[in-house]
Image (cartoon, rainbow, N blue to C red):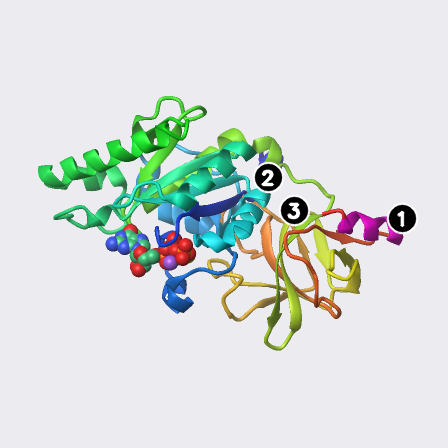
Amino acid sequence: SLTNLARLRSPILCVLGHVDTGKTKLLDKVRKTNVQEGEAGGITQQIGATFFPMTNLRKLTDQVSHSVKVDYKIPGLLVIDTPGHESFSNLRSRGTSICDICVLVVDIMHGLEPQTIESLQLLKRRRCPFLVALNKIDRCYDWQPNKDSPIQDTLAKQKSHTVREFESRWQGIKGEIASQGLNADLYYENKNPRKVVSVVPTSAITGEGVPDLLLLGIQLTQKMLVDRLMLSEALEATVLEVKVTEGFGTTLDIILVHGELHEGDTIVVCGMQGPIVTTIRTLLTPHPMKELRVKNEYVHHKSIEASMAVALPPVTSSLQAAMGVKIAASGLEGAVAGTSLLRLEKEDDIEELKSSVMED
Ligand code: GTP
Ligand code: MG
Ligand code: NA
């Protein structure tokens, strides 16, 4: 029913994979941005969050949704980009600890690489549902681009030697995944998506397979995670990054999973020198389809509630459940990323909250 629809928050989708498999480029393709080329050395060094409203996702998945029927029940997707470089395994771990589903990006030319395997093991351990994006298919010899198209249409247009190369590379990677103890199938051949990992061939450059990947992400969360996505009133928020933002001093980039935050709220977070108790001065979000870590014009909010999520078009509000939010407040220097953010309520004992944030 409609009341049920309105109660689902947007799923948090985390993108994982070895360095340079194309994680950021894939998101750039969806956002029509160019974050990747702005990164020092083309290497992601932080976690980034982008909100994709369902109105945009509907347009992007339009072509595939004719063949794969899907009801859109969620208000959008909150997508978290992570670095693939080996020195950032803490950020990959943080990303997967707050996400609902993952997309593991594999370079079809390289197959499984060290951080792919690390990520696979992390996903298995956490029992996190995930998809594999088999990226850079456009690098198969003599690839005929078919911009932003569904993958099956694209493959049908390739010459037979290109299809043979694609097939043989995919079979090799399927074998490598099997040797990690997991079964995988191309998603349109997968008869048992709950047990067998679905694989979506993609190109972040020509956009092929990207509509399929988005649609599948939506489908997977809606099928497997409805209970997890039911909104609750209780505040659930995680600190992603602690950093200086021009004009705002030290700020927290957080993911608001459930509940509501207001300017003036007293919050408690874990700090290196002990618990930090402070008051929210400013609440900011990036514009939809823009990334939290990129310097943008921010949207100011008096309050942000994770329950304003309504799945029905047109989505007029930028306030969608599961948000990437930036908090400006004094005294945030030394706050620790990856820990919970709590709010002091009237009935709360401040000392209890202080010790609880330090347990993270
Ligand atoms: P890290 O964040 O550093 O782990 O890398 P990443 O996985 O985000 O990869 P990134 O988006 O930085 O892409 C790495 C390089 O591969 C860039 O030069 C991209 O232009 C290129 N690339 C990414 N996706 C594709 C693709 O589908 N096809 C081709 N041909 N090149 C791609
Ligand atoms: Mg990247
Ligand atoms: Na890169």
Residue ID at (72%, 47%): 360
- Residue 72 at x, y percent in the picture: 47, 38
What residue is pinned by disc 3? 307
Mark 2 nearby-residue class (10 Å; few <14, some 14–19, many ≥20): many
Mark 1 Cα shell of 10 Å, populated few (<14), some (14-19), many (≥20): few
Answer left or right for 129 relative to 257. Answer: left
Under mark 3, the amino acid is: Ser
Between the residue at mark 3 and the residue at mark 1, the CA separation in whole angstroms equals 23 Å
SS category of the residue bearing label 1: loop
Q: Per the image, is 355 magenta? A: yes
Which of the marked residues, 3 or 1, is nearer the chain's N terminus? 3
Tell me which secondary structure the magenta stretch mostly adopts: helix
Q: Disc 1 beta carbon < 8 A from ligand 2?
A: no
- In the picture, the disc for residue 8 is 2
- The answer to whether residue 175 is left or right of residue 56 is left
Asked whether, in this view, residue 142 is left or right of residue 277, the answer is left
Locate residue 164: give its quadrant: top left
Kindly indicate whether the residue at mark 1 contacts the one at mark 3 (C-beta within 8 angstroms): no
> Residue 159 appears at what percent x and percent y?
10, 40
Please provide the residue range marked out in magenta: 348-358
